[in-house]
Image (cartoon, grey):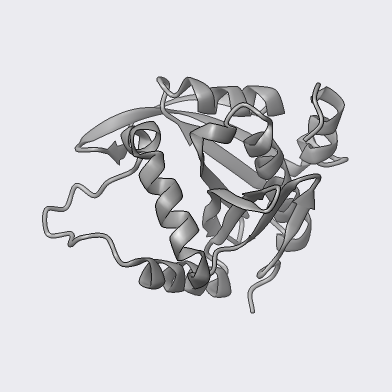
């Protein structure tokens, strides 16, 4: 099993845990309810030969295989016991880089409650301790105001714009890149977030 996986991470009412096949109904219904909220930010493939997306069971199997291989950490986000989103640490690279990239989504009905900043802080701290990474980045469309608020709340460093960085809904889109290294948060990103958070979870 890969270092630091599987894992369950908790802070208040926020829990990160591996996505399971039995999450299918909750995950699919949450995604369907939030299609208009989420689809405009979803990465797509520019390859016309790419087939339809896999079924949920195949999707979870692929994510869990990545977790076991140590190339990703795919978490479900739970809030007060309800599955409300997903966070994945992807592109995990060892060697001289020791880095990963975090992507996430959350249901609109719980947005703005500090759930995603808490989830990101939990994941970053886990990556810097149990997983042994040194740097984590988050790449965000400049138009995605809600997601930009997440990295602002956490105080992640703005590294500038990556032009035409990801394929999103049929076109190559610019992203702003934010990052944090383990030296920047010696007490952990969660501890920094606790100090600045104004409302309890």
For the C terminus, give its image quadrant.
Answer: top right
The residue located at (66%, 69%) in the rendering is: 5
Q: Position of residue 12 (x, y in %)?
A: 81, 45
Q: Position of residue 114 (x, y in %)?
A: 68, 31
Placement of 100 over or under 23, stated as above or below: above
Q: Position of residue 34 (x, y in %)?
A: 40, 39
- Answer left or right for 162 relative to 81: left
Count of numbered labels shown in the rendering: 0
The residue located at (62%, 55%) in the rendering is: 98
The residue located at (33%, 43%) in the rendering is: 43
**Closer to us: 186 or 200:** 200
- Answer left or right for 150 relative to 64: right
Q: Is residue 175 shown to the viewer in this render?
A: yes
Give the residue furthest to the left: 48
Q: Position of residue 90 (x, y in %)?
A: 51, 54
For the N terminus, give its image quadrant.
Answer: bottom right
**Closer to us: 66 or 95:** 66
Give the residue furthest to the bottom: 1
- Answer left or right for 30 relative to 101: left
């Amino acid at each position: 099993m890969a270092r630091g996986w599987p894992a369950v991470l908790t802070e208040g009412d926020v829990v990160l845990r591996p996505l399971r096949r039995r999450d299918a109904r909750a995950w699919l219904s949450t995604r369907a309810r939030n299609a208009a909220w989420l689809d405009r930010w979803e990465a797509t493939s520019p390859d016309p030969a790419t087939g339809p997306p896999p079924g949920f069971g195949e999707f979870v199997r692929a994510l869990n295989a990545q977790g076991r291989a140590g190339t990703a950490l795919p978490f479900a986000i739970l809030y007060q016991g309800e599955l409300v989103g997903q966070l994945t640490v992807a592109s995990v690279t060892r060697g001289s880089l020791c880095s990963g990239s975090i992507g996430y989504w959350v249901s609109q009905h719980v947005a703005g409650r500090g759930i995603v900043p808490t989830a990101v802080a939990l994941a970053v701290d886990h990556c810097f301790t149990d997983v042994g990474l040194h740097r984590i980045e988050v790449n965000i469309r400049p138009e995605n105001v809600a997601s930009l608020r997440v990295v602002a709340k956490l105080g992640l460093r703005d590294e500038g714009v990556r032009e035409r960085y990801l394929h999103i809904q049929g076109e190559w889109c610019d992203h702003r890149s934010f990052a944090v290294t383990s030296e920047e948060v010696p007490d952990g990103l969660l501890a920094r977030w606790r100090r600045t958070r104004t409302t309890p979870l």
